[in-house]
Each structure stands twice: as C-alpha cells, then as structure tokens.
Image (cartoon, rainbow, N blue to C red):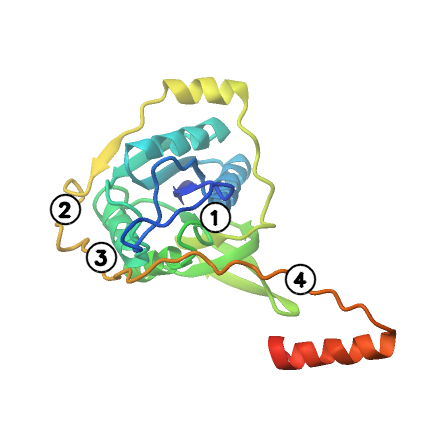
Amino acid sequence: MNLFVFVKRVPDTESKIRINETGTNVVFEGLNFVLNPYDEYAVEEALRIKETHGGQVTVFSVGPDETQAILKKCLAMGADEAVLIKDDEAELYDGWRIARIIAALLQKKYSEFDLLLFGKQSVGADNAQVPSMVAEMLGLPQVNVITKLELTDSKGVAYREIEGAHEKVEFNLPAVLSAQKGLNEPRYETLRGIMAAKRKQIPVLTLEELGLTPEEVKPRLEIVKVESPPARKAGQVIEDEPRVAAQKLVAFLHEEVKVI
C-alpha cells in the first residue's frame, strides 16, 4: 500500500504563549515546536498498516525549513520518505489554504496513493478542517476522528466513538482518514532509526513548483483579534452547617454560575 501521512509542526503545549503587539497572533519567537500529537497517531497507524500489508510510508508537511525537524522524527519512527512543502507564512489559522496546497501537491506530484492519513486536528489551530477539505477537493471518501481501522486490498472499515455508542463506517480506497487518540500507541524513535533519519535527504518543494500563484493561496480567513483566556477566579469555600451550606451552594449555582 502507498500510504501518505500529513503532519504539522506546532508549539509545544507546555510553552508559555504570548500575544503579539497588534493582538492578531501569538509570538512564535522563542517557542519550542513539536510534532502535532494527533499526527503521531496517524504516523503510527501508517507504520502498522505497512507492517501488515506491505507498502511504503511517505510523510509530508507544509511549513518553513525548520519543519524538517519533525519530518526527521517521523523518519526515525520508521517512515520511508519525507517531503517538505516549503511555506514561510506564519500560522494563519486558515484550513482552506493548507488543504489547497495539499490538494495541489497530490494532483501535480503524487497522484498514486491508497490512503491519506491526518491527525484529527492540530493543537495550534484546533480547526479540524484540513482532512475534510482535502477529501472534498479530491473527491475522496473520508472518515474522521477514527479510533480503530481494518483494511483489505480495496476496502476499509473505520470505527468512531460517538455519544453513547460506536459508529462503524465502510469505505473504498483510496480514502482520507483522520486519527483520534486511542487509535494506537505511537512508538518511540529507536537509536538506529534516528541515525538513519540523519542520513536521509528531505526533498523540498515550493508552492511555485506546485503551480500555485500567490492569489490561489491567499488566505480566506482574517484574524481580527487574539486574546488570552480570562484569569481563573479564586475558588470559594462555604463553611456552615450542612443545611445552610446547601442553600448557599444552590444560590451560588443559580445566581452567579447560572447553571440551575
């Protein structure tokens, strides 16, 4: 099977996020960047499919030159090849733009594949849009937020967790899938894998090589304002005899929190 996995470089969730002076984005300088956690599940699933069915795993990412670090991590995990689509734009939070770039890549350069695997969302933007948009642009079946996958040569069955039940979806290949936590447990890179990844060259493609003009990848989303969440208020302690304390608690939930 020819398996393509799309990954993203995102700020480490433990990083301290600051808002820029214009209030329209975060300050990226000084942040530690990592492989998007949900994308790790996608990479791991591709590696397991290869181990079961054979084939090749190729990992792609759209971003600046620094993105090669997460591609190297994917190679160290066991991916066969990695490709960078160079894009020096800062995070624009525009899922359509990234989906357009990926669709152009697949239409112009890599048209032969069996599965396109994504993480369900990036922890940087949290839009969960790109997999569905790519599927729509390419006219492919899609199943998102999957927690279990079964494949044959030309068909697949994916399972999703929905409220109070599990959903089973059958689909034909090629298809687009997005991975949820619980699909698998991503492996660690091995020392042998890390050394092999260091020796591998990562091809770099530009947007121009994909035939995309600046107008075609112009963002369709405008960020008006970015702000930090409000500071959490200090908790309250109700100290009284049980009957009175219960009355005060009910009054608090009704009048201040407004949940009853």
From the viewer's perspective, is the residue at label 2 or at label 3 nearer? 3
Q: Which residue matches tag 4?
A: 235
- Whole-angstrom CA distance, mark 1 to mark 3, is 38 Å
Mark 2 or mark 1: which comes first in sequence?
A: 1
What type is the residue that disc 3 sits on? Pro
Mark 4 or mark 2: which comes first in sequence?
A: 2
Residue shown at 58% from the left, 49% from the top: 183
Q: Which residue matches tag 3?
A: 219
Q: Which residue matches tag 1?
A: 153
For label 1, count other residues whose C-alpha is less than 10 Å away and answer few (under 14), some (14-19) or many (20+). Answer: few
Q: Nearer the viewer, residue 155 or 185?
A: 185
From the viewer's perspective, is the residue at label 2 or at label 1 nearer? 2
| Whether residue 10 is situated above or below residue 180 in the rendered picture | above
Query: In the image, 187: left or right of 80?
Result: right
Mark 2 or mark 3: which comes first in sequence?
A: 2
Query: In the image, 212: left or right of 77?
Result: left
- Whole-angstrom CA distance, mark 4 to mark 1, is 57 Å
Q: Which residue matches tag 2?
A: 211
What type is the residue that disc 1 sits on? Asp
Q: Nearer the viewer, residue 9 or 200?
A: 9
**Relative image position of residue 112 (x, y in whole percent):** 31, 44
